[in-house]
Image: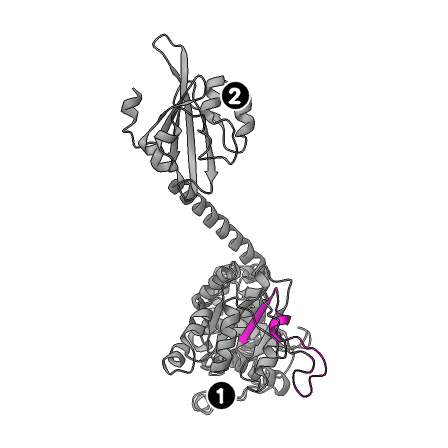
Amino acid sequence: MLNILEYTPIPQFAIDLHHKITFWNKACELLTGLKAAEMIGTDRQWVPFYPEKRPTVADLILTNDFENFLELYKDKFPAVSNIITNAWEATDKFENIGNRLRYIYFLAAPITDPGGKIIGAIETLQDITTQKLLELSLHNESEQLRKENLTLRSAMKHPYRFGDIIGKSKAMQEVYKLILKAAATDTNVIISGESGTGKELVARAIHDLSPRKDHEFVTVNCGAIPENLIESEFFGYKKGAFSGADSDKDGLLDLADQGTLFLDEVGQISLSMQVKLLRVLEDGGYTPVGSNRVRKPDIRFIAATNTNLNEMVAKGRMREDFFYRIHIIPIHIPPLRERKEDIRLLVDFYWEEFGSSTKRPLIPESARELLQKHDWPGNIRELQNVLHRLHTLNTIELPEKIKKTSLIKQQIDSPAGTTQSSHDLGSGRAQFEKQFITEKLQQFQWHKTKTAAEMGISRKTLFRKMKKLGLL
């Protein structure tokens, strides 16, 4: 019988009543790396699995010691087999069987003679590593998604706001997803986008959602540091390192230890400095100016640029190895002209920052339409500037090309938002109703169901009024 088992692809061994190995098939040799010739006749069945001698499942089956089986395999899923009579089973993880990590499923059963008398035990060893790793991968993926959802819910306290980032557009929803993925890792991130799109806000959001959130978020404008000072600014220096170095000074890397270093406009870093930062990125550490002691801080790097780094590499203005070290998780922030559905949200958000609701007038719909038409080459930074001037000077000022088709100077005449253009009761009533509905829509972030409920009308009636008043 045991000779037939010699050819099974499943590893198996058998022991006699004295716990000596009587059978060790070829599949068992392949799994453990131990030859049958060196195992048969010994009681070394434990050797492939454990650092010191202890009973295998077959040994425990032979002595019918179920209590000891449960104790020894308590964290290995011990159980009575529901497939084979009188068999016990367990699953264990081993760091090195046959020079690799393996998960092994053990199934041991007694061997009996024709009269039913126990004469030994046989144990089957099934390598379930592939299935187990897949199971763990799916579990980890599920757990990661659960954590991302929890993080997303905590970060998005407002339906269209992620931290200090505003937007409901599909493009911004993709940015939010990448922020979550980046925050869940410690991998370097590169954020690209035009000037004024909010790259630092994205970097800050990644930091604030990451395990490093309780440590420093250090921002450095790479283009603002003079070339002759950049090394001492990044690496710090020791007292006496150069003229004027009257005391030791920590560099930006020291300040960012355990936290995040945000390299704004990373394309401005010189080639020579890229070489020195590359060593830090590769965990080689750095040496402060005037010191011979290497420091190795624990830093997460996030870089940002408004230039095409691939073109810089092609032109030799950026080292290829430096590029690949920082360009691991890319996040692109779309310009405002490509997500115009977010403009009303942004206008409401920044307008609220300029004062309390009792002192802040409404922005007339005509002014909102004007803002909606603009392409915003300066992106959010330009929008903030225009709204600030509007709040201060009651005037919207946009580029000349808009002036050709739109009224530029739109006055906001009163806190209630009324204008001097209403000369009859009908137009005055319509103007008031339009501004009242606009105010309520702003209050509920243009959520029409909530707005209608607040006003005591049906959603259908609200739609009809908005269409009549030009709000749709």
* Front residue of this view, candidates 242 and 155: 242
Q: Left or right of 251: which side holds 95?
A: left
**192 or 104: which is nearer to us?**
104
Residue tagged 1? 407
Front of the two marks 2 and 1:
2
Q: Quadrant of residue 453?
A: bottom right
Q: Is residue 241 magenta?
A: yes
> Is the residue 253 above or below the residue 116 in the image?
below
Nearest to the observer: residue 289 or residue 168 = 289
The type of colouring in the image is one colour
Q: Is residue 412 above or below residue 67?
A: below
Label 2: few (<14), some (14–19) or many (≥20) C-alpha neighbours in 10 Å: some
Name the residue beneath numbered marker 2.
Answer: 66
Number of numbered discs overlaid on the protein picture:
2
Write the start and end of the magenta stretch as one range: 239-263
177 over 88 or under it: above or below: below
Measured as percent of width and height from the top left, residue 279 is found at 51, 71
- Image quadrant for the N terminus? top left
x, y percentage for residue 190? 47, 71
Q: Name the residue: 39% across, 36% down.
A: 32
Q: Earlier in the sequence, mark 2 or mark 1?
A: 2
* Residue at x 40% of width, y 81% of height: 312
Quote the CA–CA distance across marks 2 and 1. 89 Å
Position above or below: 246 against 186: below
Residue 11's x, y, as percent? 35, 31
Specify the quadrant of the image occupied by residue 9. Answer: top left
Can residue 103 be seen in this snapshot?
A: yes
Give the overall secondary structure of the magenta segment: loop
Residue 422 visible in the displayed image: no
For the C terminus, the image quarter is bottom left
For badge 1, the amino acid type reads: Leu
